[in-house]
Image: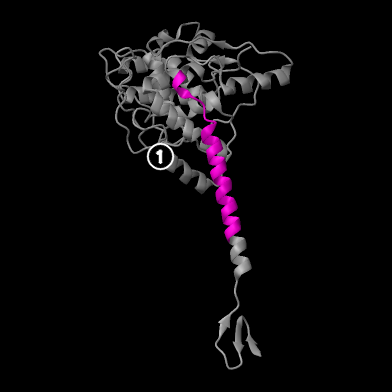
Amino acid sequence: MTVRHGDVHTPIGGSVTRRKAGPIRRWVARLAFVIAAASAATGAYVYLTLPDVTTLKNRNPPTTAFMALRDREYREARGKVPRRRQAWVPLRRISPHLVNAVLLAEDAAFYQHDGVDYHELWESMKIDWREKRLSRGASTITQQLAKNLYLSPSRSPVRKFRELLITRRLEAALDKPRILELYLNVVEWGRNLYGVEAAARAYFDVPARDLTPAQSALLAGMLINPIRYSPLTPSRRLTHRQRLILQRMARFGRISPQEYRIALGIRPLAPPSPPELIPDAPADELDAEDPTADPPVIAAPPSHEPTDPPVEPAPRSNDPALSTDRSPGVQSPVIQ
């Protein structure tokens, strides 16, 4: 005979024993095993289905996942196959002004990080947490290239995990100039318009190697949303972004004081004097009204690449990169 006191059984004339919680423990253990097995299977599937990026060393991709997505959207909306405009050019045939403008606007630490800018990522997470929304982008140029080449715009954890793995593979297989060359040739610059050569000819009727500082800053500024913004009819925000990018190019010696004034439409000074720099913008976006923080700067590219344009980025400061969120545009096309 036993006397029951809660979970304790006291046998008459015997020792005290506790009721075993075996079924609950077994259930928790099975659940943990299922979760672990599912996670391992997902990770293995993602890893085994990653693309082979080594072919990009000496071969230009004929299309990308992002181009295919845009083609489907165009066919569904208009019922016909779109006509892509794209012309591949090597990095040495792209204006250094355009290269510097894109680096300053999109990924100032490009030559410093290994594909993921952890400083920028941390700053982005803090801002998103504070504002309770995904408001600020933290993708590097390599991450944007990975997404353009192989992935969808989805923000699911699995897609982001694949992006991270592909990014690391790109950085391991390719050097920085090749990554930059691929990005500048596949990135969207308007409806059915891909790559800087096609953009330069469509908007300014010049080859990419002849882009001026003003034109380069305008093209770099529109990358935040190339469907919404157009150099043909620049909005107030696009013009503001252009001026801020030009200001950074002047501050860090990417253009001369005279080039800066000419780009702004100001008559050159004689003799030359430092440019009248407009106020700087906060690190999280280019279109703020009251900027206060100094922008990041670019690290110098490897010296063993003699054929690349003379882009000479400086060491990065403590500020994050200047890129912002890049949600697909929904307005009417800017290129007919």
**Left or right: 274, with 79 as reference point:** left
What residue is shown at x 29% (from left), y 13% (from top)? 306
Q: Is residue 136 above or below residue 176?
A: below
Q: Which residue lies furthest to the bottom in this view?
A: 13
Viewer-closest of 90 and 247: 90
Does the magenta run of residues contain 211? Answer: no
Quadrant location, the C terminus? top right
Does the magenta run of residues contain 46? Answer: yes
What residue is shown at x 63% (from left), y 83% (from top)? 6
Q: What stretch is highlighted in magenta?
A: 29-55
x and y, in percent, of residue 131 in the image: 53, 46
Q: Is residue 135 above or below residue 149?
A: below
Q: SS at mark 1? A: helix
Quadrant housing residue 81: top right
Q: In this view, does 130 lie above or below 320?
A: below
Viewer-closest of 268 and 83: 83
Quadrant housing residue 267: top left
Q: Determine if residue 287 is in view.
A: no
Color scheme of the displayed model: one colour
Tell me which secondary structure the magenta stretch mostly adopts.
Answer: helix
- Please name the amino acid that badge 1 sits on: Tyr
Q: Name the residue under label 1.
A: 118
